[in-house]
Amino acid sequence: MKVVSSYGVKIKKQNIPIRHTLYIYRQAVGYLIRVYEESWEELSRIVNPQKRFNAAEHLVHSTKKNRARYDFDQKFPKMPSYLRRSAIQHALGSVSSYETRLELWKNGTLSGKPKLTLENHAMPVFYREVMYREAGETENAAYLKLYDGHDWKWFRVRLLHTDMEYLRKHWMGKKASAPTLEKRHHKYFLRFTYTEETKLSRTAVKDQTICSVDMGINTDAVCTIMQADLSWGDDSSTSPVKKTGCTGCWAESADFRGSMGPDRVGAVGLTQSD
């Protein structure tokens, strides 16, 4: 089984163009949403996701062998290729979701006609080496490629010491995904995701106990304990977790995740490996 955990590292206040980078990225996503909505009849015929993505990129990006139909390259010059592809993926997902909901509304399955808005809350992913570089092992810093209003340049970003100490203590040597920019309460974070392999208990399903946690966005987390023949949902077995922290563990496992504040913990999930 795979255990996926994420942790947000706070970016300390400094004179770097984070907001400008976020603005230009969201502008690009909005532009692409409009383009792919106009071209959806053509794109929807392509079933294979990778081929559809390639066709979508060819619509907006020119190469030696391809002449783009839209002027994305002129409106967003020198945008790093990985960031452009991240924006394309986000825009395709938005349009695909809208078209699916629109069909459900037309069939009477969905009440209320869906709307496709160009306003979005997309957050950029800083892909390693091309958008993100680590500083020294003991440094509380990293390097991000950001847009300063004229060009994309590397900037040294200072990170919160306590967050970096936590990562060095608990995740040193573990492979992390490319960090995603996150904004909460007017503060910016880099969210790292880690994937671990763990062995499940071989206890028969009928004898297992499951702990399910709804993290909540604007409310306290709620835990529910379930067994094969019984579920407690309204008594003392389902209870809110204090906002100051959440301790995660599961039945017959020696693994212990410890307590982390809600401003640091993101999605912690379990996925069955193939």
Image (cartoon, rainbow, N blue to C red):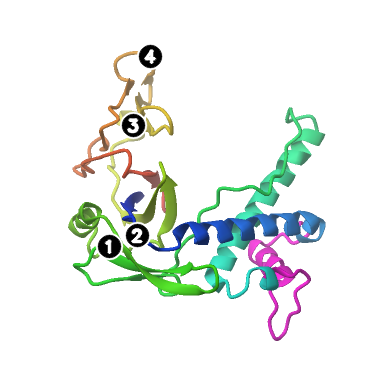
Q: Which mark is residue 174?
A: 1
| Amino acid marked by disc 4 | Asp
Give how far across and how far down residue 246 sits, in percent. 27, 34
Label 2, on which residue? 14
Among the two numbered marks 4 and 1 on one chain, the one whose residue lies closer to the N terminus: 1
The CA distance from mark 2 to mark 4 is 48 Å
Q: Residue at x 79, y 29 (%)?
A: 108
Graded by Cα atoms within 10 Å as few (under 14), some (14 to 19) or many (20 or more), the crowding at tag 3 reads some
Front: mark 2 or 4: 2
Q: Residue at x 73, y 30 (%)?
A: 110
The local secondary structure at tag 3 comes to strand
Give how far across and how far down residue 117 sits, in percent. 69, 45
Among the two numbered marks 3 and 1 on one chain, the one whose residue lies closer to the N terminus: 1
Front: mark 2 or 1: 2
Foreground residue among 175 and 72: 72
Front: mark 3 or 1: 1
Graded by Cα atoms within 10 Å as few (under 14), some (14 to 19) or many (20 or more), the crowding at tag 1 reads few
Kindly give the residue lying farthest to the bottom in the view shown: 64
Among the two numbered marks 2 and 4 on one chain, the one whose residue lies closer to the N terminus: 2
Asked if the residue at tag 1 contacts the one at tag 2, i.e. Cβ–Cβ closer than 8 Å, the answer is no
Q: Which mark is residue 234?
A: 4
Label 3, on which residue? 210
- Asked whether residue 61 is drawn in magenta, I would say yes
Give how far across and how far down residue 36 sits, in percent. 73, 58
The C terminus - image quarter: bottom left
Q: How many marks?
A: 4
Among the two numbered marks 4 and 3 on one chain, the one whose residue lies closer to the N terminus: 3
Among the two numbered marks 2 and 3 on one chain, the one whose residue lies closer to the N terminus: 2
The quadrant in which residue 75 appears is bottom right
Among the two numbered marks 2 and 1 on one chain, the one whose residue lies closer to the N terminus: 2
- Give the magenta-colored segment's residue range: 44-72
